[in-house]
Image (spheres, rainbow, N blue to C red):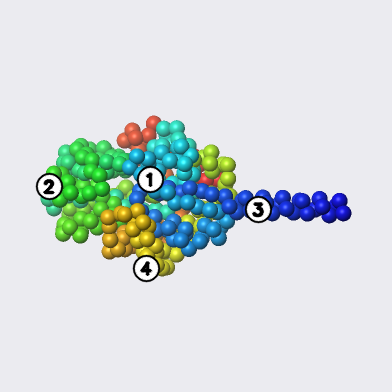
Amino acid sequence: MKYFSCIMALLAGLSFYGTVRAQQKLVFTPQWTPQAQFAGYYVAQELGFYKDAGIEVEIVHPSSTESAVARLRSGKSQVTTIPLCQAMEYIDNGMPLVNILQTSMNNGLVIVSRNGRNPAAQKGIRVGTWSVGFDQVALAMSLKEDLNYQWVPYATSINLYLAGAIEAILVMSYNEYYLLKQSGIELTEENTYRFRDHGYNVQEDGVYMLESGYRKDKEAARKFAEASKRGWLYCAEHPEEALDIVMKYVRMHHVATNRVIQKLQLEEVLKLQIDRDSGQREFRLRPDMVKQANDLMLESQLLLKEVAYKQIIAR
């Protein structure tokens, strides 16, 4: 009888442990407000992919007073999305980060000029850039090409460009680029400079955790990455359903956008996920692109020392 009681107690303990593990919670904060750029995570949440993987995920977006990285530093969030070069800069500055999933295989940066001329052939022009954070690839490119741009910060609007206050504007191919098109701006090969077509095809968005958080529970990190990947693959197969889910988050957070813009954004984000060499969605950080990013940022003195691939990638 005593033996039976011990066995039952052991089984109960194992059951409790399994329940605790299954209910483990991760707070995920994407780097920006709700939009199709993060569709895969919304789909994974709404369709239960995270729960299927055995983790509970709460999606909390950044605020005007607290960025995604600030939430990561403070421990309020355990997972976020960061472009590769920005992540490397954080690591160089002493913030150990680990990449657990790479969603971008190509660079989506674009400079659009107002005068119909190639932005890379115009030195010293005023170029709008995001006030929330400078893009390292754009800065490195301008320094390497000796363009001496005058960078003018803008918030979330393209009004400075439309008003003629700046000669060019830095945009994402899946975001502000389509706002320009909707505004009637003529976008041609002459006035549009796509970084990925000019030797600056550095990967962008990846999913990152603090190294300490990753070491604490690698299994939870793996489950989050796999479920998120499943969400993105579902978006590619069911884009209209994915858009329904994106619009739910957009309305919930009162984001000023529309379904047409979000559809164009999702289509472009999904294109950027396809590796140029293999033609596949690989969801991996490429060592050659990490080296390219290192070379570019070291040459431009945006890094003090090399950030090796093995420092970034989850192992």
Callout 2 secondary element: loop
Instruction: Give amino acid for label 1.
Output: Pro
Which image quadrant: the N terminus?
A: bottom right
Residue 41 visible = yes
Q: How far apart are marks 4 and 3 (CA)?
A: 36 Å
Instruction: Give amino acid for label 3.
Output: Gly
Q: Earlier in the sequence, mark 1 or mark 3?
A: 3
On the image, numbered disc 1 is attached to which residue?
62
Residue 285 visible = no
The spot of residue 82 in percent (x, y) is 40, 45
Q: Which of marks 2 and 3 is nearer the N terminus?
A: 3
Callout 1 secondary element: loop
Task: Say which quarter of the image contains residue 137.
Answer: top left
Q: How far apart are marks 4 and 2 (CA)?
A: 36 Å
Q: How far apart are marks 1 and 3 (CA)?
A: 32 Å
The spot of residue 68 in percent (x, y) is 40, 43
> Which residue is pictured at 53% across the width and 41% down the height?
213
On the image, numbered disc 2 is attached to which residue?
164
Instruction: Please determine whether, in this image, residue 202 is positioned above or below residue 95.
Output: below
Front tag of 4 and 3:
3
Q: Nearer the viewer, residue 154 or 308?
A: 154
